[in-house]
Image (cartoon, grey):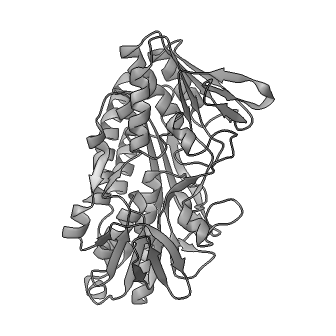
Amino acid sequence: MTNITRRHFVKILSAATAVGSFGFSATTIAQTGGRVVVIGGGFGGATCAKYIRRYGPGIGVALIEPDAKYITCPFSDTVLAGINSMDFITHDYGKLRETHGVNVVQDTATAIDPVGKTVSTKGGKTLPYDRLVVSPGIDFRWGQIEGYDEAASEIMPHAWKAGTQTELLRKQLGAMPDGGVVIIAPPPNPFRAPDAPYERASMVAHYLKNTKPKSKVLIVDSKSNFEMHDLFTQAWEKFYPGMIDWVEGSDVLTRVDLKEMKIYAPGGGSFKGDVINVIPPQQAGAITQTAGLTDASGWCPIDQRTFESSKHKDIHIIGDACIAGDMPKAGSAANTQAKVCAAAIVSSLTGGTLPDATLISIFYLLIDPQYVLSDVGVYRLAEGKLKKVSGGASSLKATETHRRKEAKYAESWYSSITSDAFR
């Protein structure tokens, strides 16, 4: 893929804001009524709430989110690297309230009544809806690794939900002696941001190279390969020779020993680290489990054209929680799914027709602040499934100039997608 094409995708991702892009006329949307509740204020939920209001200003939208601010997983590894602060990846909901008229309810959704069409919250509220959007992100499958439960993540942090866990892992890296070993243990597929464990290894190595150069990063993987393996290993040899080792696997970890700071792989092999980042197996967010929106896989089946649940009518599921064909579980995917979902909801409430849509995802993966890899996917509906129709990763033969340009594109992308979701 060329630089121009890649730049064009970023513009599509961040600037597909015109109501006309989904065929809604100003006259139609002005007359729209109805109530929509959105659960979850991440890239999917916040974007969807904003765009429902944009496409249908007459629609009342309530966004239920327990936290006053959202801390993004994208660019959280730059905090581990000492490049950015937590403030850089933290965003509030003020503009959604003030500019877009979204009723932001700081509370936790605890139950969905698909028959009565209401959502109950921990704070005792009951919110009625005509359409419901569920965008809860991921939850962890605690206990699948012996010895690793939620309490264990305070010793071996996962940092796969940005926030206090990010700060904990950063603190552990800071306290580790020079010459220590950092272990990163990625989970089996599918999981949120499948390329991110390898970016994390790079950013941790960047920090160690500058502060504790005798240290090592060991990736004990559950997989025997990963999509951008050659690109990462080429970059690691350039920037962190001898510092990052990748141990391929064929199954998940069997157990952890918190006291000995060891992890155990199938076959009895063990690895000891000074800092251990265990990323546990994942499933759709907890509210989808209790509401009966998941299938045996632990994820949510949907109509991949409208993102409406296959389990319950008038409930839409977007982002990491849904089964969206070839699309990865990533913030950029959630953002573009949210716009299509918003259009589908406004179409259903107005009696309009939803046109065919093109969806995209994009990963920017930092090796060094001036050396970035990217992976773009373009998706269209075919036989009821979202299929990847074009796209591609950075070239192994890319020049240094190209990598530096990718670094600038990454910064622009982050600024654009956070503005698109939260501003």
Q: Residue at (44%, 86%) from the top-left corner?
A: 130
- In percent of width and height, residue 41 lies at 38, 62
Query: Which image quadrant is residue 271 in?
Result: top right
Q: Is residue 155 visible?
A: yes
- In percent of width and height, residue 415 lies at 28, 47
Is residue 182 depicted above or below 329 in this figure? Answer: above
Q: Residue at (52%, 45%) from the top-left corner?
A: 193
Query: Which image quadrant is residue 257 in?
Result: top right
Report whether 38 appears left or right of 379. Answer: left
Report whether 44 appears left or right of 32. Answer: right
Residue placed farthest to the front in the image? 259
Q: Residue at (49%, 43%) from the top-left corner?
A: 160
Is residue 14 depicted above or below 194 in this figure? Answer: below
| Residue nearest the observer in this picture, 66 or 285 | 66
Q: Is residue 352 visible?
A: no
Q: Residue at (37%, 40%) from the top-left corner?
A: 75
| Residue nearest the observer in this picture, 91 or 275 | 275
Is residue 215 depicted above or below 359 in this figure? Answer: above
| Residue nearest the observer in this picture, 237 or 271 | 271
- In percent of width and height, residue 231 lies at 53, 28
- How many numbered marks does the figure carry? 0
Residue placed farthest to the right in the image? 267
- In percent of width and height, residue 180 lies at 50, 15
Q: Quadrant where the C terminus lies? A: bottom left
